[in-house]
Image (cartoon, rainbow, N blue to C red):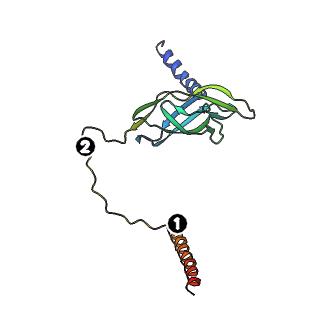
Amino acid sequence: MRTRRPALVALLALPLAAATALAAPQVRGAVAAEHATVGDLVAVELEATLPAGSGIAALRLPEPLARWGEAEVVAAEALLPDVASDGPLRYRGRVTLRAFRPGPLDLPPLPLAAEPAGAATVVDPGLTTPPGLTLAIASVLPQGDEPVAPRPPAPPVALPLGARFWWTLGALAAACLLAGALLGRRRRPAAE
């Protein structure tokens, strides 16, 4: 009978542990592109789960944020709450990055600042972006020792003449006609 009590206590503690895990703030992140090359824009989706009634209007990354690890930050959106519900609130946002070094790039945890609803001050909720986010950046150059086979030359392509060409040609033709008329008029009185 004594062997069943710890199992019974563990079974009764499961719902309490699950409710506590849901009440604890969590931040998750995912890199949108699995394969990116040097210079590509890569989006990192962030999602924070906070208990209902936290009173936070938005979560923000530190500002100004120019770099995240070895990646350049192109744009950083605030994490805004989804539609209100009775359960925990989910805040979602996106950070757009560009990397110029091939290989795996680690994105270290960054602190998140909270904007409380109705107040202008920024509060530190103690949340950070999740550790372990990594960008996999591939080189645009071919790997290995094999030489790259040159492509055959493409046939010439005729480029269209733009409007600037025709305006310039018309203006020069008009200037030549005007100069010719002036020269002809100068010569006429001398011949009489």
User: Horizontally, is 70 left or right of 26 in the view?
Assistant: left
Q: Quadrant of residue 26?
A: top right
Q: Nearer the viewer, mark 2 or mark 1?
A: 1
Tell me the residue at 66%/37% (across/down).
86
User: Horizontally, is 99 left or right of 124 in the view?
Assistant: left
Q: Secondary structure at mark 2?
A: loop
Tell me the residue at 28%/53% (across/down).
151
Mark 2 residue crowding within 10 angstroms, few (<14) / some (14–19) / many (20+): few
Q: Secondary structure at mark 1?
A: helix
Give x and y (percent) for residue 130: 52, 29
Give x and y (percent) for residue 163: 52, 68
Residue 185's place in the image compared with 153, above or below, is below
Three-letter code, disc 1: Arg
Most extreme residue toward the bottom is: 192
Report the residue marked by disc 1. Answer: 164
Q: Quadrant of residue 183?
A: bottom right
Instruction: Measure the alpha-carbon separation of dots 2 and 1.
Output: 43 Å
